[in-house]
Image (cartoon, grey):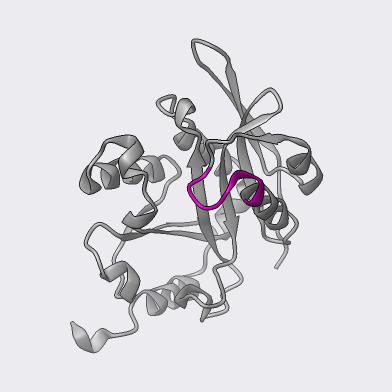
Amino acid sequence: MKHPKTYNAKEIKTPNECILIEGPIPQDKLASYDFHDGLVAFRQPKQQQKALVEIAGLPEGRIIIARVHDMIVGYVTYLYPDPLERWSEGNMKELIELGAIEVAPEFRGYSVGKNLLRVSMMDDAMEDYIIITTEYYWHWDLKGSGLNVWEYRKVMEKMMNAGGLEWYATDEPEISSHPANCLMARIGKRIEPESIQQFDRLRFQNRFMY
């Protein structure tokens, strides 16, 4: 499967500066920018930037960023699911995962997350994918946001909806382990019915439970 990547961009004006949302960004560009030290949700900023550079080099890998001048203040990643996860079991070439989305705390409140997703979906190639994201409450910044788990879940759902992702039921054990966890997905317009059926089989592997 080919993975064409068409660059798109959008500006968000804030009282202090403009935030440029753009991508997919190639490896060399990603490596050349500064990385905001508030981007610590998954690992330390320098390590996370290195991980994003590696993802950008994958055939299917996509990184959309939010930046102020030469400083990355937010990002979203797309790549094939981890080989250890259920979602890779079907070896579906058209199934990619929104692996991480993060916005530096001081730039929250300007719909940066929603616009990262909107710019992602401007590329027509996204209609050739089933895009999934697995949301686990233990990744959420409950302390920093001051929200409880259900309030944060509502915020996450609204943000994902901006990119066309919707809630999907599943019996995957980690997702099922807490009611706030969820699977969300966007099925591209050019996805064949057989692929949707295969995705359904990945979602439910323990039908005898129902």
Image quarter (top left, top right, bottom left or bottom right) of the N terminus: bottom right
Would you say the magenta stretch is mainly helix, strand or loop? loop
Q: Is residue 30 left or right of residue 112?
A: right
In the image, residue 114 sits, relative to residue 28, either above or below, namely above
Q: Is residue 117 a member of the stretch shown in magenta?
A: no
In the image, residue 161 sits, relative to residue 60, either above or below, namely above
Q: Is residue 42 a member of the stretch shown in magenta?
A: yes
Residue 112 x/y as whole percent: 48, 31
Residue 93 x/y as whole percent: 61, 71
**Residue toward you, 149 or 126:** 149
**Residue 141 location, quadrant:** top left
Residue at figure coordinates x 58%, y 48% from the top left: 44
Q: Is residue 38 left or right of residue 180?
A: right
Q: Is residue 151 left or right of residue 114?
A: left
Residue 42 x/y as whole percent: 51, 52
Residue at figure coordinates x 28%, y 43% from the top left: 152
In the image, the segment drawn in magenta is 40-47
